[in-house]
Structure formats: C-alpha cells, structure tokens
Amino acid sequence: NAGVTQTPKFQVLKTGQSMTLQCAQDMNHEYMSWYRQDPGMGLRLIHYSVGAGITDQGEVPNGYNVSRSTTEDFPLRLLSAAPSQTSVYFCASSYMGLAAIPSYNEQFFGPGTRLTVL
Amino acid sequence: KNEVEQSPQNLTAQEGEFITINCSYSVGISALHWLQQHPGGGIVSLFMLSSGKKKHGRLIATINIQEKHSSLHITASHPRDSAVYICAAPSGGTSYGKLTFGQGTILTVHP
C-alpha cells in the first residue's frame, strides 16, 4: 500500500492564483482531512470528509474548498491564494470505527505540501 | 489557555538518557494520540491510548484520564529519536471528534 500520498511536495504561488493540492489514499478509509501547520501553532483542521459526497468545515476553512467524489481522493482547492496561506499542508485519513468517531482511530498522514504564496 | 499543552517545548538529551514528554489537555474526550514528526516533515502515529499504558520498543505512553494528562517516555534515547513529538486529543461535540493538537516538543538527542 502507498498509504496517503500528496502532490505536489512544494509549490510557490503568486497572490491571487488558484491551485489544487492533491491527496489520495489506498486504505479504503472513510475519513479524510486536511490540516495546515504553521510555526508555533499546532496542526489545524481546514476541512474534512466522512465519505464520498460528504464534506464539512474545520476550524480554518476560509479560502479553501474541498470535494470528495471518490473514497480515495480528497483534493484541497485554494481559490485565490493569499500570503496568509503560506504553510505546510497535511492530508490525513483514518477509519471511522464502530462508534463513527475517526479521531479515536489511528491517523495516517501524507508527506505534506509546502506552499509559499508571494 | 491552549486546550492541549505540551511540556517541555524543547528538550535536549545525551544518547542513552531517559526522556519524558508531558501532555495536558482540557478538551473533554478520554483518549489521546502521540505522533512523531521527523525532520523531513513526515508525521507518523505512535500511539492512541484511552487508558493505562502502551509500549512499543523503547517508547512508552501512559495516560491518566481523571487528571487529563499523558506522558511519552523514551528509554535509552538515540540520535535517531530526534524529532518533534506531538500529542493530540479528540474534542467532543458533533464534528466527528475533531483532534486538537499540541504545539509539539522538539527533541534533540546528541551522540
């Protein structure tokens, strides 16, 4: 299994540009999520999905869109990049579990995408 | 006050030393994750525990649910243990148990 994969690994954008960060997993996990990691702050949840066709906002969703058309893929779209979105982005996945609370289950992280917005 | 607090923020040790990293959380769910982030940036799950103690090789994690406190211990530390260690607690509510992360403890082990 490849686990959780993310592309690209590095990206530089200009303010106002749009782009999509790709995330895929081959473990048939129902739950997928996007986090951003900034210096001095813990990982913060941007958006999450509990299955194909179902997405919801996390704690820092502004400026980002997601969709989940398949179980495997969960792309994150930056609509109009801003310098405040300079960060490292991690995609993660896990099983929902019997209690349907994925945060009680092991989390699998992708390698991250380092994004710089000029 | 952060919902998940780790201490210390930075830790330097000599090879072979016993290391303890602490995590206190105020969110209301009775479980905790320990994660390891390598210098290259990748994050891996070490433990998820809801009671007692878990051991994997030289790593031991303990949790006290009543006190909302967990510790990660590394015995016979090695330079390859140098990494950022992150604890995360599931919060309550309806958001499928959102994880709240600590800021991480930067561990450096010198030979």
Image: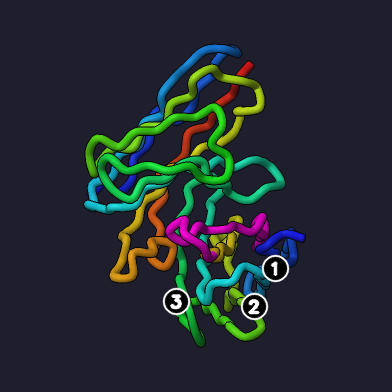
Which amino acid type corresponds to the residue marked 3 in the rendered image?
Gly
- Which residue is located at x 33 percent, y 70 percent? A99
First of labels 3, 2 by sequence position: 3
Find the distance from the CA under tag 3 to the CA under tag 1: 19 Å
A92 to A70, vertically: above or below? below
- Which residue is located at x 50 percent, y 67 percent? B33
Residue segment shown in magenta: B92-111
Which amino acid type corresponds to the residue marked 1 in the rendered image?
Gln
First of labels 1, 2 by sequence position: 1
Q: Badges 3 and 1: C-beta atoms under 8 Å apart?
A: no
Same-chain check, marks 3 and 2: yes
A46 to B66, vertically: above or below? above
User: Picture quarter containing residue A24?
Assistant: top left
x then y, percent, for residue B21 = 66, 71
Query: Which of labels 1 and 2 is toward the front?
Result: 2
x then y, percent, for residue B54 = 46, 81
Instruction: Name, please, the residue furthest toward the front.
Output: B94
